[in-house]
Amino acid sequence: MFRKQLFYIVLFICLFSFGFRTCLAYDVQKVAALPVLSINNISVDKDVEEIIAKALANKFHMPLSKVVPFFEIIPEEEVIAALPVQLKGKKKSKLENSMLAAVADKLNADIVIAAEIKAYRSILRVNRDGDRLQETHLAMRVINYHRPSGTFTEKNDHEFYVGDDIGWGRPEYIADQMIYKLLNKIPDYR
Protein backbone atom coordinates (compact mmCIF):
# COMPACT_ATOMS: atom_id res chain seq x y z
CA MET A 1 0.00 0.00 0.00
CA PHE A 2 2.79 2.44 0.95
CA ARG A 3 4.78 1.50 -2.16
CA LYS A 4 1.79 2.19 -4.38
CA GLN A 5 1.28 5.65 -2.82
CA LEU A 6 4.99 6.40 -3.09
CA PHE A 7 4.97 5.35 -6.75
CA TYR A 8 2.06 7.70 -7.54
CA ILE A 9 3.69 10.58 -5.68
CA VAL A 10 6.97 10.13 -7.57
CA LEU A 11 5.07 9.77 -10.86
CA PHE A 12 3.12 12.98 -10.16
CA ILE A 13 6.29 14.91 -9.32
CA CYS A 14 8.03 13.67 -12.48
CA LEU A 15 5.12 14.56 -14.75
CA PHE A 16 4.65 17.92 -13.07
CA SER A 17 8.31 18.92 -13.40
CA PHE A 18 8.67 17.72 -17.01
CA GLY A 19 5.51 19.59 -17.98
CA PHE A 20 7.03 22.91 -16.92
CA ARG A 21 10.31 22.18 -18.66
CA THR A 22 8.57 21.86 -22.03
CA CYS A 23 6.74 25.16 -21.47
CA LEU A 24 9.90 27.00 -20.51
CA ALA A 25 11.76 25.67 -23.55
CA TYR A 26 9.36 27.46 -25.89
CA ASP A 27 10.90 30.44 -27.70
CA VAL A 28 8.99 33.69 -27.41
CA GLN A 29 8.18 35.16 -30.82
CA LYS A 30 8.72 38.89 -31.33
CA VAL A 31 5.81 40.68 -33.01
CA ALA A 32 5.91 44.05 -34.77
CA ALA A 33 2.51 45.65 -35.38
CA LEU A 34 2.89 48.47 -37.88
CA PRO A 35 0.79 51.62 -37.52
CA VAL A 36 -2.37 51.74 -39.62
CA LEU A 37 -1.45 52.89 -43.12
CA SER A 38 -3.64 54.56 -45.72
CA ILE A 39 -2.66 54.84 -49.34
CA ASN A 40 -3.26 57.81 -51.65
CA ASN A 41 -3.55 60.26 -48.74
CA ILE A 42 -6.94 58.92 -47.67
CA SER A 43 -8.22 60.80 -44.63
CA VAL A 44 -9.44 58.36 -41.97
CA ASP A 45 -11.19 59.11 -38.66
CA LYS A 46 -8.90 58.72 -35.64
CA ASP A 47 -11.48 56.46 -33.95
CA VAL A 48 -11.37 54.05 -36.89
CA GLU A 49 -7.55 54.03 -36.86
CA GLU A 50 -7.50 53.35 -33.11
CA ILE A 51 -9.92 50.42 -33.44
CA ILE A 52 -7.76 48.84 -36.15
CA ALA A 53 -4.47 49.49 -34.30
CA LYS A 54 -5.79 47.95 -31.07
CA ALA A 55 -7.04 44.90 -32.95
CA LEU A 56 -3.62 44.39 -34.59
CA ALA A 57 -1.85 44.52 -31.22
CA ASN A 58 -4.45 42.28 -29.55
CA LYS A 59 -4.16 39.62 -32.26
CA PHE A 60 -1.05 38.31 -30.54
CA HIS A 61 -2.10 38.97 -26.94
CA MET A 62 -2.66 35.71 -25.08
CA PRO A 63 -4.39 35.11 -21.75
CA LEU A 64 -1.82 34.59 -18.99
CA SER A 65 0.88 35.98 -21.27
CA LYS A 66 2.73 37.29 -18.22
CA VAL A 67 3.03 33.73 -16.84
CA VAL A 68 3.85 31.82 -20.03
CA PRO A 69 4.71 34.31 -22.79
CA PHE A 70 4.16 33.21 -26.39
CA PHE A 71 4.58 36.60 -28.03
CA GLU A 72 6.54 39.74 -27.21
CA ILE A 73 5.05 42.86 -28.74
CA ILE A 74 7.75 45.28 -29.90
CA PRO A 75 7.06 48.85 -28.66
CA GLU A 76 5.43 51.17 -31.17
CA GLU A 77 8.29 53.69 -31.07
CA GLU A 78 10.81 51.05 -32.18
CA VAL A 79 8.49 49.90 -34.97
CA ILE A 80 7.99 53.45 -36.27
CA ALA A 81 11.75 54.06 -36.21
CA ALA A 82 12.31 50.91 -38.30
CA LEU A 83 9.79 51.80 -41.02
CA PRO A 84 11.19 52.29 -44.53
CA VAL A 85 11.25 55.86 -45.87
CA GLN A 86 8.39 55.08 -48.27
CA LEU A 87 6.02 54.51 -45.33
CA LYS A 88 6.91 57.67 -43.42
CA GLY A 89 5.48 61.14 -43.93
CA LYS A 90 2.30 62.33 -45.55
CA LYS A 91 2.55 60.60 -48.92
CA LYS A 92 2.77 56.87 -48.36
CA SER A 93 3.36 54.23 -50.97
CA LYS A 94 1.55 50.93 -51.13
CA LEU A 95 2.65 48.40 -48.54
CA GLU A 96 4.71 45.67 -50.20
CA ASN A 97 5.99 42.30 -49.00
CA SER A 98 9.62 43.42 -49.22
CA MET A 99 8.90 46.30 -46.83
CA LEU A 100 7.53 43.91 -44.18
CA ALA A 101 10.55 41.65 -44.59
CA ALA A 102 12.88 44.66 -44.18
CA VAL A 103 11.11 45.71 -40.97
CA ALA A 104 11.33 42.14 -39.65
CA ASP A 105 15.07 42.02 -40.36
CA LYS A 106 15.69 45.45 -38.84
CA LEU A 107 13.80 44.65 -35.61
CA ASN A 108 14.71 40.96 -35.50
CA ALA A 109 10.96 40.28 -35.37
CA ASP A 110 9.47 36.87 -36.05
CA ILE A 111 6.09 38.27 -37.09
CA VAL A 112 5.19 41.58 -38.74
CA ILE A 113 1.54 42.53 -39.19
CA ALA A 114 0.03 45.60 -40.84
CA ALA A 115 -3.31 46.99 -41.93
CA GLU A 116 -3.71 49.21 -44.94
CA ILE A 117 -6.86 51.24 -45.61
CA LYS A 118 -7.45 51.25 -49.34
CA ALA A 119 -10.72 53.24 -49.39
CA TYR A 120 -12.66 55.20 -46.78
CA ARG A 121 -15.68 57.45 -46.92
CA SER A 122 -18.18 58.38 -44.23
CA ILE A 123 -20.95 60.89 -44.96
CA LEU A 124 -23.95 61.72 -42.79
CA ARG A 125 -26.80 63.37 -44.71
CA VAL A 126 -30.25 64.66 -43.88
CA ASN A 127 -32.95 64.16 -46.52
CA ARG A 128 -35.97 66.42 -47.17
CA ASP A 129 -38.06 64.56 -44.61
CA GLY A 130 -35.48 65.18 -41.89
CA ASP A 131 -34.25 61.58 -41.79
CA ARG A 132 -30.55 61.08 -41.15
CA LEU A 133 -28.85 58.86 -43.72
CA GLN A 134 -25.41 57.32 -43.30
CA GLU A 135 -23.12 56.42 -46.19
CA THR A 136 -20.01 54.45 -45.26
CA HIS A 137 -17.45 52.81 -47.51
CA LEU A 138 -14.40 51.00 -46.14
CA ALA A 139 -11.86 48.79 -47.90
CA MET A 140 -9.00 47.27 -45.97
CA ARG A 141 -6.07 44.92 -46.46
CA VAL A 142 -4.27 43.05 -43.69
CA ILE A 143 -0.85 41.62 -44.49
CA ASN A 144 1.25 39.41 -42.27
CA TYR A 145 4.85 38.20 -42.57
CA HIS A 146 6.18 35.20 -40.66
CA ARG A 147 9.97 35.39 -40.86
CA PRO A 148 10.89 31.84 -39.67
CA SER A 149 8.87 30.27 -42.48
CA GLY A 150 9.27 33.16 -44.94
CA THR A 151 5.53 33.22 -45.66
CA PHE A 152 3.24 36.16 -46.33
CA THR A 153 -0.49 36.11 -45.68
CA GLU A 154 -2.71 38.78 -47.21
CA LYS A 155 -6.45 39.22 -46.70
CA ASN A 156 -8.72 41.89 -48.22
CA ASP A 157 -12.26 43.00 -47.47
CA HIS A 158 -14.56 45.90 -48.26
CA GLU A 159 -17.99 47.00 -47.17
CA PHE A 160 -20.38 49.64 -48.39
CA TYR A 161 -23.38 50.83 -46.37
CA VAL A 162 -26.09 53.31 -47.36
CA GLY A 163 -29.12 53.61 -45.12
CA ASP A 164 -30.54 54.96 -41.90
CA ASP A 165 -28.14 56.38 -39.34
CA ILE A 166 -27.97 53.32 -37.10
CA GLY A 167 -25.15 51.65 -35.18
CA TRP A 168 -24.09 49.04 -37.71
CA GLY A 169 -23.76 51.62 -40.46
CA ARG A 170 -21.25 53.72 -38.54
CA PRO A 171 -17.62 53.54 -39.72
CA GLU A 172 -16.35 52.51 -36.27
CA TYR A 173 -18.66 49.48 -36.17
CA ILE A 174 -17.85 48.47 -39.75
CA ALA A 175 -14.09 48.80 -39.10
CA ASP A 176 -14.35 46.73 -35.91
CA GLN A 177 -16.27 43.93 -37.64
CA MET A 178 -14.03 43.97 -40.71
CA ILE A 179 -10.72 43.83 -38.81
CA TYR A 180 -12.13 41.03 -36.63
CA LYS A 181 -13.00 38.96 -39.72
CA LEU A 182 -9.66 39.64 -41.41
CA LEU A 183 -7.54 38.85 -38.34
CA ASN A 184 -9.33 35.55 -37.83
CA LYS A 185 -8.07 34.52 -41.28
CA ILE A 186 -4.43 35.23 -40.29
CA PRO A 187 -2.55 32.30 -38.65
CA ASP A 188 -1.70 32.55 -34.93
CA TYR A 189 1.78 30.90 -35.17
CA ARG A 190 1.56 29.37 -31.69
Image (cartoon, grey):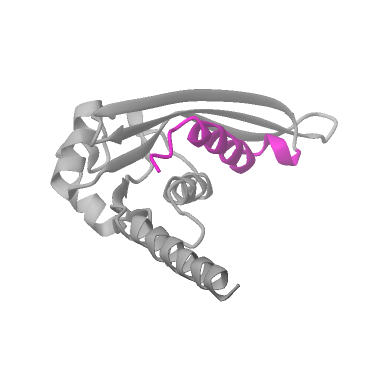
Vertically, is 39 above or below 76? above
Q: Quadrant of the N terminus?
A: bottom right
Q: Quadrant of the C terminus?
A: top left
Which span is picked out in magenta?
Answer: 166-190
> Residue at the spot x=49%, y=47% of the render?
55
> Residue at the spot x=50%, y=31% of the render?
120
**Residue 184 belongs to the span the image colors magenta:** yes
Q: x and y percent of residue 167 in the render?
A: 73, 41
Vertically, is 40 above or below 62? above
> Residue at the spot x=15%, y=40% of the render?
85
Q: Is residue 94 visible?
A: no
Q: x and y percent of residue 169 in the render?
A: 69, 34
| The quadrant where residue 142 appears | top left
> Residue at the spot x=30%, y=42% of the render?
111
Count of numbered marks = 0
**Residue 182 belongs to the span the image colors magenta:** yes
Vertically, is 95 above or below 9? above
